[in-house]
Each structure stands twice: as C-alpha cells, then as structure tokens.
Amino acid sequence: MGKIRRGNYLFVGWIGDHAPRHVHVYRDKKLVLKWDLDHGVTMKGRATKHIIELITKLQLEGRL
C-alpha cells in the first residue's frame, strides 16, 4: 500500500506487516488512528466519522 494522502491525513500501510491487516493514520506527523481493515475496528486512537469515511472511500478505490 505505501503512503496515501487525503486532506490533512496520511494513511500508511506496509505489505507483509503483522496481522490483522491494518492502516496507520497520521495528522501533523502524529498517529491519530490505527485501524483494523479486516474487522473494521479501532486498534489504537480514536476513529472519527470523517476518517472512517476516508478509509471506506480508499477501500472502494482499491487503495487499502
């Protein structure tokens, strides 16, 4: 996956990273969310409605 910027957020994921499949979300170089892509739940941080919408769009585009 690599790095994807959307708005003020940077979404980062690594191929071959530990399970479950997840994405790190940064804002202003600070981790705001670690999101489990397989189960759709927060692993760390706080998931806002806006961030969840961005993740959903990226998944629909096949980017995550």
Image (tube, helix red, strand yellow):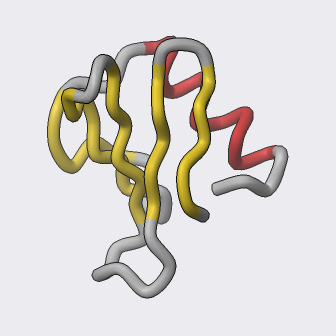
Residue that protrudes farthest toward the front in the picture: 29
Q: Quadrant of the N terminus?
A: bottom right
Left or right relative to 32: residue 37: right
Q: Residue at horizontal 28%, vertical 45%? A: 34
Write down the quadrant of residue 2 in the picture. Answer: bottom right
Residue 9 x, y percent position in the rendering:
47, 23
Q: Residue at horizontal 16%, vertical 42%? A: 44
Residue 7 x, y percent position in the rendering:
59, 14
Residue 43 x, y percent position in the rendering:
21, 49
Residue that protrudes farthest toward the right in the picture: 61
Left or right relative to 21: residue 61: right
Left or right relative to 39: residue 59: right
Residue that protrudes farthest toward the bottom in the picture: 16
Q: Residue at horizontal 37%, vertical 56%? A: 36
Residue 24 x, y percent position in the rendering:
35, 47
Left or right relative to 63: residue 42: left
Q: Residue at horizontal 49%, vertical 14%? A: 8
Write down the quadrant of residue 60 in the picture. Answer: top right
Q: Is residue 8 above or below residue 45?
A: above
Q: Nearer the viewer, residue 10 or 21?
A: 10
Q: Quadrant of the C terminus?
A: bottom right
Count of marks, rendered view: 0
